[in-house]
Amino acid sequence: MKALLLIDIQNDFLPGGALAVPEGDQIIHIANNLQDKFDLVVATQDWHPAEHKSFAVNHEGKQLFDVIELVGMEQVLWPAHCVQGTSGADFCAALNTDKVEAVFRKGTNPEIDSYSGFFDNGHLNSTALADYLRSKQVEQVYLAGLAGDYCVYFSAKDALLEGFQTFLVEDATRPIDPLGFAKAKEDIKKRGGNIISSSML
Ligand code: VGL
Ligand code: ZN
């Protein structure tokens, strides 16, 4: 079985949002058109409490995009985004969610960030996404969404660690930083994953 993972296609990651990914809106029609080609479609949703420690505003004397240490890991300090219950945390209205069978929320623990849809950044807690996919006999996981160099990348790495054949749909994502995304794609390939175009599906 083949699953499509729609990663964090939320208003705050689109142009005009709190943590806008350049051209993030250009993936929506691709994410919509892809869904028919899959046995299963699931989505992840970045879902932070307002006091989340990944937000620069929650650290006195720190600036946006400063890097600090949080639970022993490097942490970029982001603008407040995807705060639970706000419109910024909603899925983009143009995204077709009719076929989405389950939504996995992440980033709810204020003490640690959670880029991947599978685990927090310290791999301390899981979202149950891997077990859910296995319970549906999924063997191939395809990733689309935002941002390519953060949540899509981290989700792809964890999909590989969990033993899924993993495909990043390159034209169905956009990065925050193109250089970081180039490195991320190389790393995914090195780990045995595949970078593909939606035209190959
Ligand atoms: C993301 C930074 C912070 C993402 C989420 O969805 O890529 N990036 N939180
Ligand atoms: Zn976040």
Image (cartoon, helix red, strand yellow):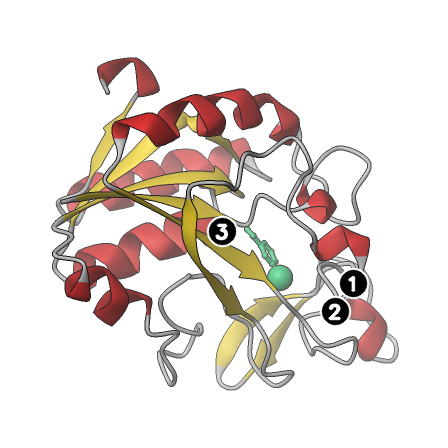
The residue identified by callout 2 is 55
- Circles 2 and 1, Cβ within 8 Å, touching? The answer is yes
Residue 44: image location, x then y, percent: 48, 56
Residue drawn 42% across and 61% down?
116
- The quadrant of the picture occupied by the C terminus is top left
**In this image, 185 relative to 191: left or right?**
right
The residue identified by callout 3 is 150
Q: Earlier in the sequence, mark 3 or mark 1?
A: 1
- Circles 2 and 3, Cβ within 8 Å, touching? The answer is no
In space, the residues marked 2 and 3 are separated at their CA atoms by 15 Å
Q: Identify residue type, mark 2.
A: Phe
Residue drawn 16% across and 52% down?
138
Q: In terms of image quadrants, where is residue 17?
A: top right
Residue 152: image location, x then y, percent: 43, 47
In space, the residues marked 2 and 1 are separated at their CA atoms by 5 Å
The residue identified by callout 1 is 80
Q: Identify residue type, mark 1.
A: Ala
Residue drawn 77% across and 52% down?
88
User: For the residue labelled by badge 1, is the local secondary structure a helix, a strand or a loop?
Assistant: loop
Asked whether 200 or 101 is in front, the reply is: 101
The correct choice, above or below, for 2 with respect to 85 in the image is above
The correct choice, above or below, for 191 with respect to 107 in the image is above
In space, the residues marked 3 and 1 are separated at their CA atoms by 16 Å
The residue lying furthest to the front in this view is 98
